[in-house]
Structure formats: C-alpha cells, structure tokens
Image (spheres, rainbow, N blue to C red):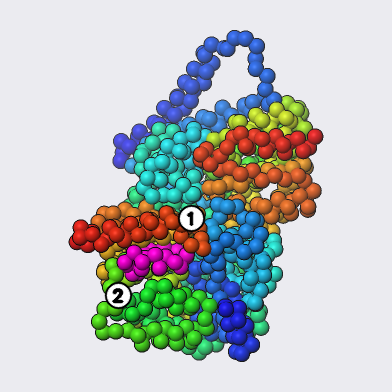
C-alpha cells in the first residue's frame, strides 16, 4: 500500500509532468516540415490546448497507479462526485474513456469482443467499448485503475445502470446508484427528497469504504469549487455569443474533459479560468475559431467522436461554425445550481435537472434559448443510434425549432462511438446539401 | 373485441379506462379506483398509422408501434394513458406523445425505483403510488379508501396464486400453449374478476395425470409476440412448461404472506418481492437463481431466450443468461424479434431444429 502510494504520487507529481514536458520538447525539436504551409480555414490554435493535454495526460498517467494507493471509483458523467472528492477517491469516467476509444477508432475492435459474449450491437457504443476494454485490458490510455466502487446516476440514461451492473458482476464490487426520477414539468417534492435521501445513503457507503468521515466544511468547499468550475465553463461557452465565436463547437467537445473528469478541483478551475481569459482575449481581438465565420449553427446530442476532424473541416471550409451545443451546455446548467450552503439539497436539484432527465418541452425551450442567445441560423440534430434517450423526439424537435425559432434544422443519422454505424460519404453529402440551402 | 369490452365496462360499470404501457405498475390501485387497465404491448404487426415515423427505427417496436397506435386514435376509447418508468424509450414516449402530439387525453406517469429497494426507494415508491392515485383521481374517480385497496390487493393476490398453481401443474392441463397463453394474456385488459373467472374455468380442466406429452421447454423474454411461437413450439413436439416473459410469468408475484393493515405498505412489499426483472434493474445473480428455480420446477429440457430488438434493459442481461445456461449445460436458443405479425421461415426452422436437438437422447440426459 505504501509503495503503491509512493508510485502514485511520483506518477502524478514527477513522471506525469516530466512526460508532458518531454513530449513538448520532442515536438519543438522535430524538424519543421518544408514547403508552403497548407491553408486551413481555422483561426489560430488555442494555447490552452497544451495545458489541456498536460492535465489529461497526467490524469490518465497517475490513474494507472491509483488502485492500491487511493480508493478508486468509476463514475458516470452526471454523478455527484463532490461527495467523493473529500474522501480522496480517484475517479475514472468510463464515458470519457470510451470517447477516447472512439476518437482512436478502437470501438469496433473492443465491441467485437463483447458482441461475441452476447452483447447486442444495438446497445450504447460507450458501454460496449468500456466493457470490451475491461474484458480485454486494451485501452488507448495505457491502463485504467481497478475500481473499489462503481457509482452510477440515471440522470443521463438508464443504460448506465445496466452497464455498471455488468461491471459490478465482473469486478465483484459494490455498485452505488443515484436514481433520479425523470422530470415531467416540475419535479415534485417526493422526487427531490428521494434523490437527497440517496445522496445521504451514498455518503454512508463512501465513508464506510474509505474509513473516513466527510467534514461538512470539506464537502461545502468541494461544492463551492464545482460551482465555480461550472460557471467558468459557462463563461467559456458564453464567449461564443460574440461574433465571430472565438472557438468552435468541436473545440468545446474536447475542452469539456476537465469539467467532466475533474469537477470540484482547483486544477479544473485554474484550467477554465485560463481558457476563459484566452477566449475573452480572442473576442477582444476579433480572433475567431474560424478564419471566416459566415454561418452560426447549434449542435444537439453527443459528438461523432471518431469523425470530429472530418466534419469540422468540411463545415469550416464553408464558414459554418457550431457556436453552441446542447451537450457541452449540460455541464454548465447543472453545476451552476449546486450551492455550498446546502450541498446535499442543491446537488439533489442540480443532478436531477439535467437535460437528458427532463421532458421534451424543457429541451425545446433550452434549444430555443440557445438559438436566440447565440444567434444561430440553423441546427444539426445528431440522431445517435447508440443513445436513445438523447435521440427520441428529435424529429419533432426539428419541426418545432424550425417553426418556433425560425432556424433551419437537419437531422443527421450517425453514432457517437461506433464508425460501423456511420457512412461518412452520406453524412458529408447531407451536410453539404444543408449548407447549400443557406446560399 | 377489446374496444367493445372496454365500452361495455365503461357503460355498464361506470368504469374509467386507462391504456397502460409496459411493464410494471400497481394495478391494485387502478382496480381499487374502479379504473380498467388496458395494456398496450405494441400492438404487434406493422405500425398502425404513420406516426411511428416520428421515432427512429432504432427505437424498439413496442414504443414505435404504441405511438402509431395511440396517435391514430387506436386507444381513444380510453380516458387516459399511464406510462410506467420502464426504460429510456417508454420515458421518451411519455413526454413525446402527450407533450408534442399523439395523445391528447390525460397522461399519468409512474416512476418506479431502480435496483434493489433501499430505505430511500421504499419511501419513494410509496409516495409515488399515492401520487399516482391522486393523479388518477383527476379522471373524476374517488381516491381509493384503505378498504378498497385491501380488497383489490386480495383480488390480485388470488389471481396470482391461481396463476402459480396453474404454472406448477402445467403438465396436467389439457390445454395447448396457444390457448393457455391467450387466457393468461387476456388479463392485460379484462377486469380482474372476469380474468379470475376465466382462470378458474381453466383450472377446472386440470387432470390427475400428465396431459402434456411434448418436450418441456422454458422461455425467458419480453413478450410472446408473435403468439404463433406457441404453435411453432407445439408443432415441433414441445410445450412451454414455464415462462419468464416480462408480459406474462414474470409479473406473477409469488408472495404469500402479506400484512394488509397498511395497504400502501403492502403494495411496497409486493413491489419488493416481485420476480427479478431487468426493467427494475434487478441484480443478475438473483435473477439467474430465480430462473433456475422455475426451470427446475417445470423440468424444462431447454430454454428459449426471446427478446425484442433494441430493448436495452433486456439485452444487457443476455450475455449473463447465455453464460449461465451454457455453464449448466442447458441447451438454449436465442431469438430476437420486432413484434412481427408472424415468424419468418428461418426463425421457424431455428425453433424446430432446436426442439429436435432436445429430443435427442444426449440432450435429454
Ligand atoms: S451515450 Fe447515451 S445511452 Fe450511452 S451512456 Fe451516454 S447517455 Fe447513456
Ligand atoms: S421492449 Fe424494451 S426498450 Fe422497448 S419498451 Fe419494452 S422495455 Fe422498453
């Protein structure tokens, strides 16, 4: 345990930072490509990208040594992790890891393994990738620490519960659940009470596992930081209300990693403070995410992780920029509600009122508000084969948005994780036709 | 036929009718409030009306067909619709149809907690049941008195007890699967006393000696659609000795002791002792033990796993089921459907071939 703890500390504080600086040096020393520079439609790259890489590399690198050194919890993206932080848990986000698997295009390989075990290809690609990674030990991040606890919250979907239950069977470890009743209209009192009661139950379990007690001040402090982090993230998103937007929606997808994985930490907040300042500075100087932003769009649903590059190139070449997305916005909306003065009560409210846990009229009004505030002319609704909760209702949302927000809307059939459920050619053709409709 | 029955229930008994989406809901509350529950499992076959197109084709046929059906007026005879918190797809339908069109009458939701009951979820489900009764009262019916609720619980306990007796003595019942399951499934829309009478009629047919001569098999799955599955099984020389269909056997509660002094607490106890179901997100180990127990009781020689395509709750359990049956040397057949009106030739052949292997001496051993 002590040796493991030393390894873990060295990994996080010495080797991790060393590796990231080594990588930077290597890049600097690499001979510059000769010949004329290739023209591209994007604005100058964000400087924060390097810091993002540092943070996430160190996070995953130190994580390799976390098990045996500190308690490890695998958690869903919408889980109230504030409770875990003061207890010293290392948290792993299988969804974030699965997104990396998708970017690296290893989902089909991992999925093949689980499909042979009987998991249907129709199930969420994140779940298939993650279970496949657990079964094979293959991961693009080197190694994921084994969990002591699985923690899942149904505020994004019920799939996570089935997925985590499979993990619990595999690892033979406890699974804690925060079951958040779906909100139709307003959440009645007994729904809020239920979530709050579960948070108290969670507190007990987490304390039992670690043998530590959470001091109320410590919980309030993490809550305060998570609230600040969410607001900083919101500040970054808000920067795109300016014209031109200082970054693209595709940038947002990648820069959301710390608010998902490190919410409630100083590291997360420092990062977003820097990013917000950089974006605001770009706004002042009129520097855009695209060299020439002609059309502003909204994106709905998860990104098509394995094709972000291809799509962003195609859109950017034509001056189209996703200046807001319902997905990245989710981490702003919820986090700003949590309040250090009532960590449990406010968390119950915040984590219940998540876009995916609210009815379609709420979703429509959010989209209309985003469309208005970001002044978009159109929207692309990604109909994500892997994610039913996010996709159900999109055909109606399309019609309503067109009529009520007066914007042009298309539904794009794809998948967020598995390239086998996606035709790049067809998607490009549809997007091109959509862009042409603005001519 | 259902429509005529519902109309008769309304006019003759002054009942309200509520169309109910799958799977679990406290039916006793509806009974106690004189509300007829009419369940909607699809219906099977191609979607009835164009509105299924409002949902992606990767959403299960149960939900797509339900939207098409209610949006085309198929359920207009009902006074309201109840959407239990079964899965992400029913949950989506529960806002899509009432909020964006397709269902104009009152919509009720029943959110049941997931996972094993804890102190928090016990308190929650009780409050949710009370809230359901209050919202059903908006139909113009009185909220249930404790006595009415006790009577309803007793009535449904009697039905379940009778179903269990029939299931236990399935081999002694000289009724083929198609007819037997038709009667069981009529409980999806009959008033409980009518259903009980039909079950009693069947019980009277029980013999002292085995009446089923075929190979006993067990089916676990979602809903027995197409119903011709029973004919195909019978023609191949087998019979369904036990089932764990979410629509049928799984909803029969075997709890015998129940304290009715507080009927709401009794309903919570009933929920707690329901058969393990993936839509409650039951843990896999108790579910597998439960299936083993049924299989042993009914002496099944093989198992058919019969699922709906795109059904996340059920499909996530399939690997565990297959591993488990495989490890115990139990022959198994996996079938996946989309509420077709009938089986394809290929599916029929697979069922027939499977049953043929069960009749071979090796698998019988
Ligand atoms: S992608 Fe959708 S279905 Fe998959 S885990 Fe996320 S919210 Fe759930
Ligand atoms: S078949 Fe499965 S996904 Fe469809 S409604 Fe039933 S439980 Fe939900």
Q: Earlier in the sequence, mark 1 or mark 2?
A: 2
Residue A280 visible to an observer of this rendering: no
Check chain identity for marks 1 and 2: say if they share one. yes
Residue ID at (40%, 68%) = B230
Instruction: Name the mark nearer the viewer: 1 or 2.
Output: 2
Q: On what subunit does the disc labeled 2 rest?
A: B
Residue A378 visible to an observer of this rendering: yes
- How far apart marks 1 and 2 lie (CA) works out to 32 Å
Tell me the magenta residue range.
Answer: B219-240
Q: Front-most of A360 and A72?
A: A360
B220 part of magenta stretch: yes
Residue at the spot of label 2: B212
Residue ID at (60%, 52%) = B56
A267 part of magenta stretch: no
Q: Front-most of A263 and A154?
A: A154
Residue at the spot of label 1: B309
Q: Is residue A268 above or below residue B341?
A: above
């Amino acid at each position: 345990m002590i040796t493991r703890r030393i390894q873990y500390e060295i990994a996080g504080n010495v080797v991790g930072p060393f590796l990231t600086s080594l990588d930077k040096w290597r890049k600097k020393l690499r001979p510059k490509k000769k010949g004329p520079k290739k023209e591209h439609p994007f604005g100058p790259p964000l400087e924060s990208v390097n810091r993002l890489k540092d943070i996430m590399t160190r996070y995953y690198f130190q994580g390799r040594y976390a098990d045996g050194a500190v308690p490890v919890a695998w958690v869903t993206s919408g889980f109230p992790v504030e409770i875990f932080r003061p207890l010293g848990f290392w948290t792993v986000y299988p969804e974030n890891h699965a997104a990396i698997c998708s970017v690296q295009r290893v989902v089909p390989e991992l999925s093949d393994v689980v499909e042979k075990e009987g998991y249907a290809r129709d199930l969420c690609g994140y779940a298939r990738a993650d279970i496949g990674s657990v079964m094979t030990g293959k991961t693009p991040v080197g190694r994921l620490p084994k969990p002591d606890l699985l923690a899942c919250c149904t505020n994004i979907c019920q799939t996570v519960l089935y997925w985590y239950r499979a993990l619990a069977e595999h690892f033979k470890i406890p699974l804690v659940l925060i079951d958040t009743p779906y909100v139709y209209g307003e959440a009645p009192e007994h729904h809020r009470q239920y979530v709050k009661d579960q948070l108290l139950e969670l507190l007990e379990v987490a304390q039992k596992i670690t043998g530590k007690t959470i001091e109320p001040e410590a919980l309030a402090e993490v809550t305060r930081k998570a609230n600040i982090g969410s607001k900083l993230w919101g500040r970054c998103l808000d920067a795109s209300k300016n014209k031109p937007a200082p970054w693209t929606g595709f940038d947002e997808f990648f820069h959301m990693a710390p608010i998902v994985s490190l919410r409630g930490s100083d590291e997360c907040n420092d990062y977003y403070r820097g990013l917000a300042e950089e974006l605001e500075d770009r706004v002042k100087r009129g520097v855009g995410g695209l060299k020439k932003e002609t059309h502003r769009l909204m994106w709905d649903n998860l990104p098509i992780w394995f094709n972000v590059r291809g799509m962003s190139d195609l859109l950017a070449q034509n001056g189209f920029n996703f200046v807001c997305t319902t997905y990245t916005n989710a981490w702003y909306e919820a986090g700003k509600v949590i309040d250090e003065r009532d960590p449990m009560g406010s968390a119950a409210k915040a984590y219940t009122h998540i876009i995916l846990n609210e009815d379609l009229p709420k979703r429509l009004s959010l989209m209309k508000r985003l469309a208005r505030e970001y002044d978009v002319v159109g929207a692309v609704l990604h109909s994500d084969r892997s994610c039913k909760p996010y996709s159900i209702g999109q055909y109606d949302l399309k019609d309503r948005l067109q009529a009520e927000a007066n914007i042009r809307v298309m539904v794009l059939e794809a998948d967020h994780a598995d390239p086998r459920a996606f035709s790049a050619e067809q998607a490009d053709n549809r997007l091109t036709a959509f862009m042409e409709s603005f001519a | 036929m259902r429509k005529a029955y519902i109309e008769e229930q309304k006019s003759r008994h002054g009942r309200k009718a509520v169309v109910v989406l799958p799977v679990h809901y406290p039916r006793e509350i509806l009974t106690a409030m004189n509300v007829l529950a009419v369940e909607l499992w699809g219906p099977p076959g191609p979607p009835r009306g164009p509105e299924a197109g409002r949902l992606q084709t990767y959403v299960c046929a149960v939900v797509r067909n339900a939207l098409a059906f209610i949006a085309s007026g198929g359920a207009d005879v009902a006074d309201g619709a109840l959407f239990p918190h079964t899965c992400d797809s029913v949950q989506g339908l529960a806002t899509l149809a009432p909020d964006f069109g397709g269902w104009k009458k009152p919509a009720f939701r029943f959110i049941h907690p997931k996972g094993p009951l804890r102190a928090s979820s016990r308190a929650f489900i009780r409050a949710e049941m009370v809230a359901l009764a209050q919202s059903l009262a908006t139909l113009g019916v009185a909220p249930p008195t404790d006595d009415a609720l006790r009577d309803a619980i007793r009535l449904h306990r009697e039905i379940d007890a009778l179903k269990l007796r029939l299931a236990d003595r399935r081999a002694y019942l000289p009724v083929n699967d198609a007819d037997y399951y038709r009667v069981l499934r009529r409980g999806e829309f009959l008033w409980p006393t009518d259903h009980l009478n039909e079950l009693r009629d069947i019980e009277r047919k029980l013999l002292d000696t085995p009446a089923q001569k075929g190979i006993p098999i067990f089916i676990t799955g979602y809903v027995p659609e197409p119903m011709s599955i029973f004919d195909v099984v019978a023609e191949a020389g087998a019979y369904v000795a036990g089932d764990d269909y979410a629509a049928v056997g799984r909803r029969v509660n075997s709890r015998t002791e129940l304290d009715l002094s507080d009927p709401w607490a009794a309903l919570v106890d009933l929920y707690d002792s329901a058969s393990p179901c993936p839509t409650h997100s039951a843990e896999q180990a108790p579910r597998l033990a439960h299936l083993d127990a049924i299989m042993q009781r009914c002496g099944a020689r093989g198992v058919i796993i019969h699922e709906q395509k795109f059904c996340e709750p059920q499909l996530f359990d399939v690997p565990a089921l297959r591993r488990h049956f495989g490890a115990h040397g139990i022959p198994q057949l996996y079938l996946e459907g989309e509420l077709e009106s009938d089986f394809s030739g290929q599916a029929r052949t697979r069922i027939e071939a499977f049953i043929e292997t069960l009749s071979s001496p090796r698998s019988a051993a």
